[in-house]
Amino acid sequence: MTRLSSRRPGDATLMSADAATFTLRAAQFQLATSGHRAALSRGPAATLAERVRTFFDAGPKGPALLVGALPFDRDADDALYQPERVLSDWPAAVAEPPALAGPARPEPAADGYAGMVSSCVERLHDDTTDLCKAVLARSLRFEAVRAVDPLALAGCLQRDPSVTTYTVPLPVDAGQAPAWLVGASPELLLSRRGLTITSHPLAGSARRSSDPQEDQRVARSLQASAKDLTEHRYVVEAIVEALAPLCSELDAPDVPSLHATETMWHLGTPIVGTLKSPAPSSAELAALLHPTPAVCGTPRESAMALIQSLEPVDRGFYAGAVGWVDAQGDGDWYVAIRCARVQGKDLRLFAGAGIVADSTPALEVEETAAKFMALLTALGIEERATRDRAVAAR
Ligand SMILES: C=C(O[C@H]1C=CC=C(C(=O)O)[C@@H]1O)C(=O)O
Protein backbone atom coordinates (compact mmCIF):
# COMPACT_ATOMS: atom_id res chain seq x y z
CA MET A 1 0.00 0.00 0.00
CA THR A 2 1.40 3.43 -0.90
CA ARG A 3 0.79 5.70 2.00
CA LEU A 4 3.90 7.73 2.44
CA SER A 5 4.35 10.38 -0.18
CA SER A 6 7.49 12.44 -0.47
CA ARG A 7 5.62 14.81 -2.75
CA ARG A 8 4.49 18.12 -1.38
CA PRO A 9 0.75 18.56 -1.67
CA GLY A 10 0.06 21.19 -4.26
CA ASP A 11 3.04 20.55 -6.54
CA ALA A 12 2.00 17.18 -7.86
CA THR A 13 -0.02 16.02 -10.83
CA LEU A 14 -3.29 16.93 -9.30
CA MET A 15 -6.51 15.01 -9.07
CA SER A 16 -9.75 16.57 -7.97
CA ALA A 17 -11.74 15.58 -4.91
CA ASP A 18 -14.78 13.34 -4.80
CA ALA A 19 -17.33 13.36 -1.99
CA ALA A 20 -15.38 10.60 -0.20
CA THR A 21 -11.90 12.12 -0.38
CA PHE A 22 -10.03 11.66 2.90
CA THR A 23 -6.77 13.48 3.55
CA LEU A 24 -4.43 13.59 6.50
CA ARG A 25 -1.23 15.52 6.17
CA ALA A 26 1.32 15.63 8.97
CA ALA A 27 4.94 16.78 8.73
CA GLN A 28 6.30 13.24 8.36
CA PHE A 29 3.36 11.39 6.93
CA GLN A 30 0.66 11.95 4.34
CA LEU A 31 -2.34 9.88 3.41
CA ALA A 32 -4.94 10.70 0.79
CA THR A 33 -7.64 8.29 -0.32
CA SER A 34 -10.53 8.47 -2.74
CA GLY A 35 -13.81 6.63 -3.00
CA HIS A 36 -15.84 4.68 -0.50
CA ARG A 37 -15.53 0.93 -0.97
CA ALA A 38 -17.13 -0.39 2.23
CA ALA A 39 -18.40 1.13 5.44
CA LEU A 40 -17.28 -0.23 8.77
CA SER A 41 -20.48 -1.18 10.61
CA ARG A 42 -21.28 1.89 12.68
CA GLY A 43 -21.27 1.81 16.47
CA PRO A 44 -19.96 3.41 19.67
CA ALA A 45 -16.35 3.59 20.90
CA ALA A 46 -16.80 0.56 23.16
CA THR A 47 -17.30 -1.75 20.17
CA LEU A 48 -14.78 -0.22 17.76
CA ALA A 49 -11.95 -2.68 18.46
CA GLU A 50 -14.20 -5.66 17.75
CA ARG A 51 -15.70 -4.14 14.59
CA VAL A 52 -12.26 -3.29 13.19
CA ARG A 53 -10.98 -6.80 13.94
CA THR A 54 -14.02 -8.42 12.29
CA PHE A 55 -13.62 -6.20 9.24
CA PHE A 56 -9.99 -7.13 8.60
CA ASP A 57 -10.44 -10.80 9.59
CA ALA A 58 -12.92 -11.13 6.70
CA GLY A 59 -9.99 -10.38 4.31
CA PRO A 60 -11.69 -7.61 2.35
CA LYS A 61 -10.56 -6.90 -1.22
CA GLY A 62 -9.12 -3.42 -1.82
CA PRO A 63 -6.83 -1.35 0.42
CA ALA A 64 -6.31 -3.01 3.83
CA LEU A 65 -7.17 0.28 5.46
CA LEU A 66 -9.96 2.06 7.30
CA VAL A 67 -10.10 5.85 7.52
CA GLY A 68 -12.50 8.24 9.21
CA ALA A 69 -13.56 9.86 12.42
CA LEU A 70 -14.70 9.12 15.96
CA PRO A 71 -17.32 11.51 17.34
CA PHE A 72 -16.80 13.42 20.59
CA ASP A 73 -19.49 11.40 22.35
CA ARG A 74 -18.26 7.85 22.99
CA ASP A 75 -21.86 6.59 22.78
CA ALA A 76 -22.51 8.07 19.34
CA ASP A 77 -21.74 6.17 16.13
CA ASP A 78 -18.31 6.56 14.55
CA ALA A 79 -17.76 6.99 10.80
CA LEU A 80 -14.99 4.76 9.44
CA TYR A 81 -14.82 3.29 5.96
CA GLN A 82 -12.56 1.45 3.58
CA PRO A 83 -11.57 3.70 0.69
CA GLU A 84 -11.49 2.60 -2.97
CA ARG A 85 -7.87 3.58 -3.40
CA VAL A 86 -4.88 5.20 -1.78
CA LEU A 87 -3.78 8.16 -3.90
CA SER A 88 -0.18 8.61 -4.90
CA ASP A 89 -0.89 12.14 -6.16
CA TRP A 90 -2.27 14.68 -3.74
CA PRO A 91 -5.91 15.56 -4.57
CA ALA A 92 -6.37 19.09 -5.84
CA ALA A 93 -8.69 21.76 -4.64
CA VAL A 94 -11.04 22.69 -7.45
CA ALA A 95 -11.53 26.28 -6.24
CA GLU A 96 -10.19 28.92 -3.89
CA PRO A 97 -11.86 29.04 -0.47
CA PRO A 98 -14.96 31.10 -1.07
CA ALA A 99 -15.66 34.48 0.46
CA LEU A 100 -17.99 34.54 3.43
CA ALA A 101 -21.45 35.89 2.74
CA GLY A 102 -21.90 37.62 6.07
CA PRO A 103 -20.73 37.97 9.65
CA ALA A 104 -20.28 35.15 12.14
CA ARG A 105 -23.29 33.85 13.98
CA PRO A 106 -21.85 32.89 17.38
CA GLU A 107 -23.23 29.87 19.27
CA PRO A 108 -23.43 31.17 21.96
CA ALA A 109 -22.34 34.85 21.96
CA ALA A 110 -19.24 35.69 24.02
CA ASP A 111 -21.25 36.70 27.09
CA GLY A 112 -23.20 33.45 26.88
CA TYR A 113 -19.93 31.51 26.77
CA ALA A 114 -18.57 33.53 29.70
CA GLY A 115 -21.75 32.55 31.58
CA MET A 116 -21.11 28.88 30.79
CA VAL A 117 -17.57 29.20 32.14
CA SER A 118 -18.88 30.90 35.33
CA SER A 119 -21.36 28.05 35.88
CA CYS A 120 -18.56 25.54 35.36
CA VAL A 121 -16.23 27.34 37.80
CA GLU A 122 -19.04 27.43 40.37
CA ARG A 123 -19.47 23.68 39.90
CA LEU A 124 -15.73 23.13 40.30
CA HIS A 125 -15.87 24.91 43.67
CA ASP A 126 -18.85 22.85 44.80
CA ASP A 127 -17.67 20.33 47.42
CA THR A 128 -20.38 17.86 46.49
CA THR A 129 -19.00 17.28 42.98
CA ASP A 130 -16.00 15.21 41.90
CA LEU A 131 -15.42 17.46 38.87
CA CYS A 132 -11.82 18.75 38.53
CA LYS A 133 -11.79 20.02 34.93
CA ALA A 134 -14.19 20.45 32.03
CA VAL A 135 -13.54 21.65 28.48
CA LEU A 136 -16.23 24.01 27.23
CA ALA A 137 -16.63 24.79 23.54
CA ARG A 138 -18.44 27.33 21.43
CA SER A 139 -18.92 27.70 17.70
CA LEU A 140 -19.10 30.34 14.96
CA ARG A 141 -21.40 29.73 12.04
CA PHE A 142 -20.78 31.31 8.64
CA GLU A 143 -22.41 31.17 5.27
CA ALA A 144 -20.09 31.23 2.24
CA VAL A 145 -21.02 32.72 -1.10
CA ARG A 146 -20.71 29.29 -2.74
CA ALA A 147 -20.19 25.68 -1.68
CA VAL A 148 -16.92 25.25 0.21
CA ASP A 149 -14.27 23.01 -1.32
CA PRO A 150 -12.81 21.15 1.70
CA LEU A 151 -9.48 20.66 -0.05
CA ALA A 152 -9.16 24.39 -0.70
CA LEU A 153 -9.72 25.13 2.97
CA ALA A 154 -7.25 22.42 4.00
CA GLY A 155 -4.76 23.85 1.52
CA CYS A 156 -4.91 27.21 3.30
CA LEU A 157 -4.58 25.56 6.72
CA GLN A 158 -1.45 23.81 5.44
CA ARG A 159 0.38 27.14 5.38
CA ASP A 160 1.11 26.39 9.05
CA PRO A 161 3.76 23.62 8.88
CA SER A 162 3.37 22.71 12.55
CA VAL A 163 -0.14 21.25 12.27
CA THR A 164 -1.71 18.12 10.81
CA THR A 165 -4.41 19.06 8.35
CA TYR A 166 -7.36 16.82 7.59
CA THR A 167 -10.46 16.53 5.43
CA VAL A 168 -12.73 13.74 6.61
CA PRO A 169 -16.06 12.89 4.96
CA LEU A 170 -18.91 12.74 7.48
CA PRO A 171 -22.14 10.76 7.28
CA VAL A 172 -25.14 12.69 5.97
CA ASP A 173 -28.78 11.81 5.46
CA ALA A 174 -29.89 10.78 1.97
CA GLY A 175 -30.32 13.78 -0.32
CA GLN A 176 -28.13 16.10 1.76
CA ALA A 177 -24.99 17.78 0.42
CA PRO A 178 -21.74 16.01 1.36
CA ALA A 179 -20.26 17.12 4.68
CA TRP A 180 -16.68 17.14 5.91
CA LEU A 181 -14.71 17.90 8.99
CA VAL A 182 -11.82 20.10 7.88
CA GLY A 183 -9.13 21.13 10.30
CA ALA A 184 -5.55 21.65 11.39
CA SER A 185 -4.87 19.69 14.54
CA PRO A 186 -1.78 20.37 16.63
CA GLU A 187 -2.52 17.35 18.85
CA LEU A 188 -1.60 13.69 18.29
CA LEU A 189 -3.93 11.40 20.22
CA LEU A 190 -2.18 8.16 19.35
CA SER A 191 0.15 6.77 16.73
CA ARG A 192 1.13 3.10 16.49
CA ARG A 193 3.84 1.47 14.38
CA GLY A 194 4.34 -2.15 15.36
CA LEU A 195 4.72 -2.16 19.13
CA THR A 196 5.79 1.49 19.37
CA ILE A 197 3.19 4.05 20.35
CA THR A 198 3.39 7.81 20.70
CA SER A 199 0.98 10.42 21.96
CA HIS A 200 1.44 14.17 22.25
CA PRO A 201 -1.30 15.63 24.43
CA LEU A 202 -1.72 19.41 24.60
CA ALA A 203 -3.52 21.49 27.21
CA GLY A 204 -2.77 24.95 28.52
CA SER A 205 -2.76 27.68 25.87
CA ALA A 206 -1.94 31.28 25.08
CA ARG A 207 -2.35 33.40 21.96
CA ARG A 208 0.95 34.11 20.19
CA SER A 209 2.09 37.67 19.60
CA SER A 210 3.53 39.09 16.38
CA ASP A 211 6.09 40.97 18.51
CA PRO A 212 8.94 38.46 19.11
CA GLN A 213 9.78 39.75 22.58
CA GLU A 214 6.17 39.74 23.68
CA ASP A 215 5.76 36.27 22.13
CA GLN A 216 8.62 34.93 24.28
CA ARG A 217 7.17 36.61 27.37
CA VAL A 218 3.79 34.95 26.66
CA ALA A 219 5.49 31.57 26.27
CA ARG A 220 7.42 31.89 29.54
CA SER A 221 4.33 32.99 31.38
CA LEU A 222 2.40 29.96 30.02
CA GLN A 223 5.14 27.61 31.23
CA ALA A 224 4.91 29.13 34.70
CA SER A 225 1.10 29.30 34.88
CA ALA A 226 -0.22 27.10 37.71
CA LYS A 227 -3.67 27.09 36.13
CA ASP A 228 -2.36 25.84 32.78
CA LEU A 229 -0.03 23.29 34.36
CA THR A 230 -3.00 21.89 36.28
CA GLU A 231 -5.12 21.73 33.12
CA HIS A 232 -2.28 19.91 31.41
CA ARG A 233 -1.52 17.47 34.22
CA TYR A 234 -5.03 15.97 34.10
CA VAL A 235 -4.55 15.05 30.43
CA VAL A 236 -1.15 13.40 30.86
CA GLU A 237 -2.33 11.49 33.93
CA ALA A 238 -5.37 10.11 32.10
CA ILE A 239 -3.31 8.98 29.09
CA VAL A 240 -0.55 7.38 31.16
CA GLU A 241 -3.10 5.64 33.37
CA ALA A 242 -4.91 4.18 30.34
CA LEU A 243 -1.78 3.09 28.47
CA ALA A 244 0.42 1.83 31.31
CA PRO A 245 -1.29 -1.58 31.74
CA LEU A 246 -0.83 -2.24 27.99
CA CYS A 247 2.85 -1.30 27.82
CA SER A 248 6.14 -2.90 28.82
CA GLU A 249 7.68 0.59 28.79
CA LEU A 250 6.06 4.01 28.91
CA ASP A 251 7.88 7.33 29.19
CA ALA A 252 6.39 10.73 29.85
CA PRO A 253 8.48 13.68 31.02
CA ASP A 254 7.44 15.14 34.39
CA VAL A 255 7.29 18.66 33.05
CA PRO A 256 5.51 19.72 29.83
CA SER A 257 7.31 21.59 27.07
CA LEU A 258 6.17 24.43 24.86
CA HIS A 259 4.51 23.57 21.58
CA ALA A 260 3.91 26.32 19.02
CA THR A 261 1.52 26.65 16.10
CA GLU A 262 1.41 29.82 13.97
CA THR A 263 -1.26 31.28 16.24
CA MET A 264 -1.00 29.53 19.64
CA TRP A 265 1.39 28.44 22.34
CA HIS A 266 0.48 25.20 24.09
CA LEU A 267 1.88 23.07 26.86
CA GLY A 268 2.63 19.61 25.44
CA THR A 269 4.01 16.29 26.70
CA PRO A 270 5.56 13.76 24.30
CA ILE A 271 4.65 10.25 25.51
CA VAL A 272 6.37 7.17 24.05
CA GLY A 273 5.66 3.55 24.86
CA THR A 274 6.25 -0.05 23.85
CA LEU A 275 3.14 -2.21 23.75
CA LYS A 276 3.02 -5.69 25.20
CA SER A 277 2.17 -8.37 22.66
CA PRO A 278 -0.47 -9.03 21.35
CA ALA A 279 -0.85 -5.30 20.76
CA PRO A 280 -4.22 -3.58 20.46
CA SER A 281 -4.79 -1.80 17.15
CA SER A 282 -4.34 1.95 16.87
CA ALA A 283 -8.13 2.27 16.54
CA GLU A 284 -8.64 0.32 19.77
CA LEU A 285 -6.09 2.51 21.56
CA ALA A 286 -7.65 5.71 20.22
CA ALA A 287 -11.08 4.56 21.36
CA LEU A 288 -9.65 3.72 24.78
CA LEU A 289 -8.07 7.15 25.28
CA HIS A 290 -10.82 9.21 23.74
CA PRO A 291 -12.09 11.67 24.88
CA THR A 292 -9.07 12.74 26.94
CA PRO A 293 -9.29 15.61 29.43
CA ALA A 294 -7.86 17.85 26.65
CA VAL A 295 -11.34 17.92 25.09
CA CYS A 296 -13.68 16.57 27.80
CA GLY A 297 -12.46 16.80 31.40
CA THR A 298 -11.80 14.96 34.64
CA PRO A 299 -13.48 12.72 35.65
CA ARG A 300 -14.72 11.97 32.13
CA GLU A 301 -18.34 11.14 33.04
CA SER A 302 -18.92 14.23 35.21
CA ALA A 303 -17.29 16.49 32.62
CA MET A 304 -19.33 14.95 29.80
CA ALA A 305 -22.57 15.48 31.74
CA LEU A 306 -21.68 19.13 32.36
CA ILE A 307 -20.69 19.73 28.73
CA GLN A 308 -23.96 18.24 27.53
CA SER A 309 -25.94 20.37 29.95
CA LEU A 310 -24.16 23.67 29.15
CA GLU A 311 -23.20 23.65 25.47
CA PRO A 312 -26.00 24.72 23.10
CA VAL A 313 -24.60 22.89 20.04
CA ASP A 314 -23.97 19.16 19.64
CA ARG A 315 -20.23 18.77 19.00
CA GLY A 316 -20.72 15.95 16.51
CA PHE A 317 -17.22 15.05 15.31
CA TYR A 318 -15.52 18.18 16.71
CA ALA A 319 -13.30 17.14 19.64
CA GLY A 320 -13.47 13.56 18.38
CA ALA A 321 -10.55 11.92 16.59
CA VAL A 322 -9.61 11.57 12.92
CA GLY A 323 -7.25 9.03 11.45
CA TRP A 324 -6.63 5.62 9.96
CA VAL A 325 -5.93 2.02 10.96
CA ASP A 326 -4.57 -0.75 8.74
CA ALA A 327 -4.86 -4.53 8.89
CA GLN A 328 -1.69 -4.76 11.03
CA GLY A 329 -3.22 -2.36 13.57
CA ASP A 330 -0.84 0.48 12.77
CA GLY A 331 -2.34 3.93 12.41
CA ASP A 332 -2.46 7.59 13.43
CA TRP A 333 -5.27 9.35 15.26
CA TYR A 334 -5.35 13.12 15.78
CA VAL A 335 -7.60 15.05 18.13
CA ALA A 336 -10.23 16.71 15.91
CA ILE A 337 -9.74 20.31 16.99
CA ARG A 338 -9.10 23.62 15.16
CA CYS A 339 -11.72 22.55 12.67
CA ALA A 340 -14.94 23.34 10.92
CA ARG A 341 -17.84 21.19 9.83
CA VAL A 342 -18.37 22.12 6.20
CA GLN A 343 -21.49 21.28 4.21
CA GLY A 344 -22.37 23.13 1.03
CA LYS A 345 -22.18 26.84 1.85
CA ASP A 346 -22.45 26.23 5.57
CA LEU A 347 -19.42 26.35 7.89
CA ARG A 348 -19.43 25.80 11.63
CA LEU A 349 -16.12 26.53 13.36
CA PHE A 350 -15.46 25.12 16.83
CA ALA A 351 -13.11 26.07 19.67
CA GLY A 352 -12.94 24.98 23.28
CA ALA A 353 -10.93 25.71 26.40
CA GLY A 354 -10.12 23.70 29.50
CA ILE A 355 -11.76 25.11 32.61
CA VAL A 356 -10.35 24.51 36.10
CA ALA A 357 -11.25 26.02 39.47
CA ASP A 358 -9.18 29.19 38.96
CA SER A 359 -10.27 29.89 35.37
CA THR A 360 -11.50 33.39 34.53
CA PRO A 361 -14.49 33.64 32.15
CA ALA A 362 -13.16 36.62 30.12
CA LEU A 363 -9.80 34.93 29.59
CA GLU A 364 -11.46 31.73 28.39
CA VAL A 365 -13.52 33.78 25.91
CA GLU A 366 -10.23 35.27 24.64
CA GLU A 367 -8.55 31.85 24.50
CA THR A 368 -11.34 30.41 22.35
CA ALA A 369 -11.23 33.54 20.16
CA ALA A 370 -7.50 32.93 19.65
CA LYS A 371 -8.13 29.27 18.78
CA PHE A 372 -10.60 30.30 16.05
CA MET A 373 -7.83 32.27 14.31
CA ALA A 374 -6.32 29.26 12.51
CA LEU A 375 -9.60 28.72 10.64
CA LEU A 376 -10.47 32.40 10.32
CA THR A 377 -7.05 33.09 8.80
CA ALA A 378 -7.49 30.20 6.37
CA LEU A 379 -10.80 31.71 5.36
CA GLY A 380 -8.94 34.84 4.33
CA ILE A 381 -9.87 37.24 7.06
CA GLU A 382 -6.37 37.63 8.49
CA GLU A 383 -5.89 41.19 7.26
CA ARG A 384 -8.77 42.31 9.41
CA ALA A 385 -7.45 40.41 12.41
CA THR A 386 -8.34 43.06 14.94
CA ARG A 387 -11.93 43.25 13.82
CA ASP A 388 -12.15 39.48 13.45
CA ARG A 389 -10.87 38.96 16.95
CA ALA A 390 -13.78 41.08 17.98
CA VAL A 391 -16.05 38.99 15.74
CA ALA A 392 -14.66 35.76 17.16
CA ALA A 393 -14.96 37.01 20.71
CA ARG A 394 -18.46 38.37 20.31
C1 LIG B 1 -10.32 21.97 22.90
C2 LIG B 1 -9.41 22.61 22.17
O1 LIG B 1 -8.07 22.63 22.50
C3 LIG B 1 -7.53 21.70 23.44
C4 LIG B 1 -6.17 21.41 22.99
C5 LIG B 1 -5.11 22.21 23.36
C6 LIG B 1 -5.27 23.14 24.39
C7 LIG B 1 -6.44 23.24 25.07
C8 LIG B 1 -6.59 24.20 26.20
O2 LIG B 1 -5.60 24.86 26.55
O3 LIG B 1 -7.69 24.36 26.71
C9 LIG B 1 -7.56 22.32 24.82
O4 LIG B 1 -7.46 21.33 25.80
C10 LIG B 1 -9.76 23.35 20.96
O5 LIG B 1 -8.85 23.88 20.30
O6 LIG B 1 -10.95 23.41 20.62
Image (cartoon, rainbow, N blue to C red):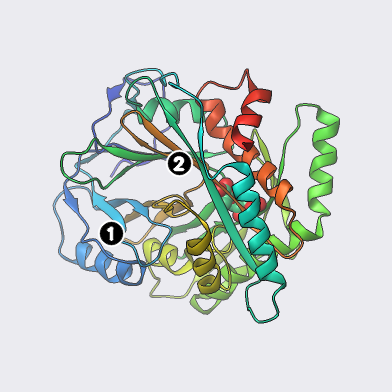
Q: Which residue is mark 2?
A: 29
Front residue of this view, candidates 87 and 75: 75
Q: In this rendering, is residue 132 above or below 4?
A: below
Q: Quadrant of residue 234?
A: bottom right
With 316 as the anchor, is 36 left or right in this view?
left
Residue at the outermost bottom position:
128
* x, y percent for residue 347: 41, 34
Quadrant of the image containing the C terminus: top right
Q: In this rendering, is residue 218 above or below 353?
A: above
The count of marks equals 2
Q: For the residues labelled 1 and 2, say whether their Cβ atoms are less than 8 Å apart.
A: no
User: Mark 1 falls on what kind of element?
Assistant: loop
* x, y percent for residue 113: 60, 49
Amino acid on which disc 1 is placed: Ala
Front residue of this view, candidates 310 and 304: 310
- The numbered mark at residue 138 is none
Amino acid on which disc 2 is placed: Phe
Front residue of this view, candidates 298 and 217: 298
Q: Which residue is mark 1?
A: 327
Q: In this rendering, is residue 228 above or below 183?
A: below
Query: What's the residue at 83%, 46% (across, down)?
Result: 220
Query: What's the residue at 39%, 55% (across, down)?
Result: 331
Q: Is residue 291 visible?
A: no
Q: Is residue 53 visible?
A: yes
